[in-house]
Image (tube, rainbow, N blue to C red):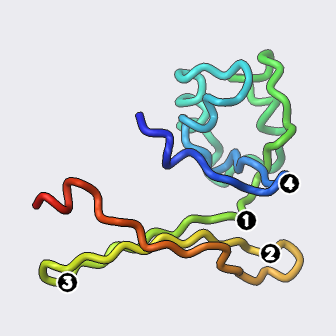
């Protein structure tokens, strides 16, 4: 498995949103096995966890000593990927954006035009 979709560089105060984290991300928490991470993601409350404490008290991980440090229940960093195809032309755009907590405004942190993948260039 490639690490690319699961890696990034964020500020120290960034947190992992437990309400949207994929099983692969949850499995990186101390003491959480991949099967437990899959169960956590599939049994997550429909409206999400109300607090980090509610998450750490979930019966699936309550006895594992999972720390709430670095966890959160909302997101402020997002990656937006746009792929455009017109005829034989292709364009990829990847933007990293931040939602500022105090103002709710969006800020573009980075914008890139990634090269096509090998499978796209050979087709």
Location of residue 65 with respect to 42 vertically, above or below: above
Q: Quadrant of the C terminus?
A: bottom left
Pick whichever of labels 3 and 2 is earlier in the sequence: 3
**SS at mark 4?**
loop
Contact between marks 4 and 1 (CB within 8 A): the answer is: no
Instruction: Estimate the spatial distance between the alpha carbons at disc 4 and disc 1, rounded to whole Å.
Output: 11 Å
Contact between marks 3 and 1 (CB within 8 A): the answer is: no
**Res 100 label:** 2
**Res 1 label:** none
**SS at mark 1?**
loop
Q: Residue at x 43, y 73 (%)?
A: 113
Pick whichever of labels 4 and 1 is earlier in the sequence: 4
Instruction: Estimate the spatial distance between the alpha carbons at disc 4 and disc 3, rounded to whole Å.
Output: 41 Å
Contact between marks 2 and 1 (CB within 8 A): the answer is: yes
Pick whichever of labels 3 and 1 is earlier in the sequence: 1
Circle 4 or circle 1, nearest the eye: 4
Q: How far across and down, in percent of the image, does residue 97 sit?
A: 64, 72
Location of residue 29 with respect to 115 vertically, above or below: above
Crowdedness near tag 4: few (<14), some (14–19) or many (≥20) residues, C-alpha within 10 Å: few
Q: Residue at x 85, y 82 (%)?
A: 103
**Res 86 label:** 3
């Amino acid at each position: 498995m490639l690490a690319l979709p699961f890696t990034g560089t964020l500020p120290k105060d960034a947190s992992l949103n437990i309400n949207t984290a994929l099983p692969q991300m949850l499995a990186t928490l101390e003491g959480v096995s991949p099967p437990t991470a899959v169960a956590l993601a599939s049994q997550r409350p429909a409206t999400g966890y109300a607090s980090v404490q509610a998450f750490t008290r979930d019966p699936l991980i309550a006895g594992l000593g999972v720390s709430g440090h670095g966890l959160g229940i909302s997101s402020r960093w997002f990656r937006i990927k746009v792929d455009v195809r017109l005829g034989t032309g292709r364009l990829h755009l990847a933007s990293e954006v931040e939602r500022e907590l105090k103002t709710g405004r969006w800020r573009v942190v980075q914008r890139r035009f990634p090269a096509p993948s090998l499978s796209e260039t050979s087709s």
